Image (cartoon, helix red, strand yellow):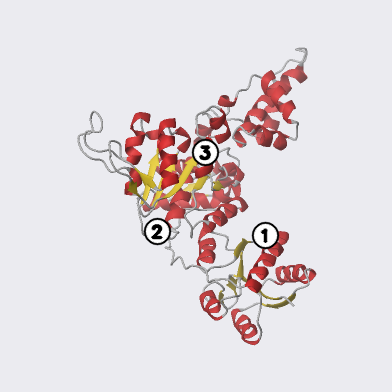
Amino acid sequence: MTRILLVEDDRSISHVITAALHAEGWKVDSCDSIAERDRLLSGSSYHLMMTDVMLSDGDGIVTLSKIQNMYPDMPVIILSAQNTLDTAVRASETGAFEYFPKPFDLDDLVSAASQAVKRSRQGSDDAEDTGIIGDKLPLVGRSAAMQDVYRMITRVLRNDLSVLILGESGTGKELVADAIHHLGHRREGPFVAVNMAAIPSELIESELFGHEKGAFTGAISQYIGKFEQADGGTLFLDEIGDMPMQAQTRLLRALQSGRINRIGGKRDIALDVRIVCATNKIFSDLIAAGDFREDLYYRINVVPITLPPLRERRDDIDSLTDHFIALAAGEGLPRRTLDKGARALMKHQYWRGNVRELKNLIYRIAVFSRDEIVTANVISPFLQELENGEQVESPSDFSSSLKNFLKNTSPGSGQVYVKALAAFEIPLLRHALEQHRGNQVKTAEYLGINRNTLRKKLTYYHIHMQDVR
């Protein structure tokens, strides 16, 4: 019979998990402390252990190395309410079979348990140790959306699979690339970042692959490109969607062969480089327009990680705010404290610029606000500055805007319904399209309408894709 050890000090969670595992026909022994866990392990053998992190008598992760040395064929699933990137990485570094932040999907947990039990019965090699991480982690947030990001990051730390990071500008794509490198097994090697959009198209090949002296007019000396600079480490290609087609061809050849040739060079150079790419563009559109090679897309998109916009992770705004307040203070700016009213206003902001926009706001408040305690009245002008920029009206604003529309419409004007519908359907369509980065299928599902209906509305209102990005 399959035997599972559950170490969980929350009785309600323990009861629910035990019932679900019993339903699979498995025997479950449960306890709520490290001491009791060790006693049970010494007297019985188990096919799987599930353990919480914070227990009454200590940290469940700290002692896992000892447990795994004693029971190398017993997989471990870690459960935790301490749902930060730190916890996810610590779980990964112990060689845990899986990590589930609370609250978790019970069906997913049972499915993972089934796979772990199968592996336990077949036997497995010890997981590779990736070393000890530092205290300074780049990503902040405990929302469910960020938990998915953390789990994806931990799954690529021990391998060299190509990663494509997707997300709007300002969501933290370079921070994810940085985490993949500095928390992974290549951490001792260089991390080289290149922004494709910041380099003139005619210079990109030279910047990436280097050149020999005299290779072209102005090449007065040899230049070692970013690929060679990143040898043994990670090359981060930001805004990969802006790479010219000729450079794409050269990049594809380098990825396929593991070799590069400097411009004007006579020999290939073998390199050991991990590639991480990022973009805020929609690849299906780029490929359809002939602006991006489809074969290169499949080469770089082995593991996609999608970063949610800040408006889809509003629960993280408080922790991000505190993080940026501390950063600003560490750089010598006055430390400000935002009260509940100010924080409530911030959670209703649209945040077109995402986390970057939030950071800039906090720094601006630190510099220009005269009040140590920032209230709703103090922060409103700063938020209004953001509102005054071009911004799609968010659905939460529609109700008050509709009242103003009707108030300013004369009773005898006629066609009030048609005009009101157009006044609010247009920003709604724009908002939905932007939220789904121009993907019409997802936009139609989000709005609850047929895709053909969406297309007709876009045509009727003359809304074009380039207008909503």
Measured as percent of width and height from the top left, residue 104 is found at 67, 60
Residue 364 visible in this rendered orientation of the protein: no
Q: Is residue 256 left or right of residue 438?
A: left
Q: Residue beneath label 1, please? A: 104
Q: Is residue 306 left or right of residue 186?
A: right
- Image vertical order of residue 327 relative to residue 166, above or below: below
Q: Amino acid at mark 1?
A: Phe
Residue 245 visible in this rendered orientation of the protein: yes
Packing grade of label 3 (10 A; few <14, some 14-19, many >=20) is few
Q: Secondary structure at mark 3?
A: helix
Q: Residue beneath label 2, please? A: 187
Find residue 450 and report its image quarter. Answer: top right
Between marks 2 and 1 in the image, the one whose residue lies nearer the viewer: 2
Q: Could you give the CA–CA distance between mark 1 and mark 3, rounded to whole angstroms?
A: 37 Å
Q: Is residue 152 left or right of residue 446?
A: left
Q: Amino acid at mark 2?
A: Arg
Residue at the spot x=62%, y=61% of the render? 101
Between marks 1 and 3 in the image, the one whose residue lies nearer the viewer: 3
Residue that lies at the very extreme toward the left in this rendered image: 220
Measured as percent of width and height from the top left, residue 105 is found at 70, 58
Find residue 70 and report its image quarter. Answer: bottom right
Packing grade of label 2 (10 A; few <14, some 14-19, many >=20) is many
Q: Could you give the CA–CA distance between mark 2 and mark 1, rounded to whole angstroms?
A: 31 Å
Packing grade of label 1 (10 A; few <14, some 14-19, many >=20) is some
Q: Amino acid at mark 3?
A: Asp
The answer to the question of whether label 1 and label 3 lie on touching residues, with beta carbons closer than 8 A, is no
Measured as percent of width and height from the top left, residue 239 is found at 45, 37
Find residue 247 and report its image quarter. Answer: top left
The image quadrant where one finds the N terminus is bottom right
Q: Residue beneath label 3, please? A: 295
